Amino acid sequence: MTFSVRALARALLLLPFFARGSDALAHPERHRERGKNLISLAHREVPDSLLDLSSKSLGCAYLLSAATLTFTPSQSLTRFTFAALVAMHIPVSFANAPLWLHKGDERKADCCHLALQAGVLLALTLTFRPCEAVPSHPSSCSHAQ
C-alpha cells in the first residue's frame, strides 16, 4: 500500500465534517438555536422536534458525505458528493455565524468565521479538483488514485 499525501490531506480536511455530523446526530439540541437563527430569516416558527430531526438528518448527511469522500475512489461519485457537501455547508456556515443578528464585535467574529469556512471550502475544492492529465506526462493524474 502506497502512502498518499493527497489521501491524508483529504482525511484531515474532512475531520471537521465528521465531528459536526457526529455531534449533530448525538446531540441535536445543541444545534437548535443555530437552526432557529437561519429560520428567523423566513419569519417562521418551527417546533423543536422538527429542528432536532433536521439536525440529525444533516448530521447523517455530513457523516455519509465525509466518509464517501474519504474512502471512495470513484471520480463521478466523488464529484457528486463534494457538490452535496458544499451545498449543505454554505447554509450551515451562515447559521453558525448569523451576521443579520449581530452588530459590532460579534459581527466581526461572524465575518471571521465565514472567512474561515470559505477557506475550508477552497481547500476542499483544490483537494478534490478533477484530474487534469497532460498527454506528455501520464503521471500527472496520480492524485485521482
Image (tube, rainbow, N blue to C red):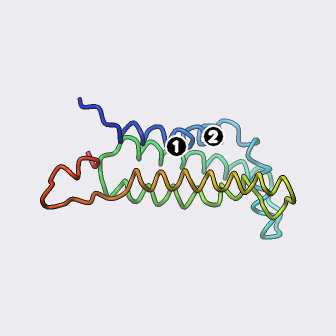
Crowd rating for badge 2 (residues with CA inside 10 Å; few <14, some 14–19, many 20+): many
Whether pointer 2 and pointer 1 mark residues with C-beta atoms closer than 8 Å, the reply is yes
Q: Point out the tag, 2 or 1, that comes first from the N-terminus.
A: 2
Which residue, given by chain and number where applicable, does mark 1 sit on? Answer: 63
At 23% from the left and 47% from the top, the residue drawn is 142
Q: Comparing marks 2 and 1, which lies closer to the viewer?
A: 1
Q: Residues within 10 Å of mark 1 (few under 14, many from 20)?
A: many
- Does residue 94 sit above or below 55 in this rendering? below
Three-letter code, disc 2: Leu
- Where disc 1 sits, the SS reads helix
| Element marked by disc 2 | helix
Residue 88 drawn at (x, y percent) = 57, 57
Q: Position of residue 119 (x, y in %)?
A: 56, 53
Find the residue positioned furthest to the bottom: 42
Which of the labelled discs sits on residue 25, or is there none?
A: 2
The residue located at (87%, 58%) in the rendering is 104
Give the CA distance from mark 2 to mark 1.
Answer: 9 Å
Q: Is residue 124 left or right of residue 29?
A: left
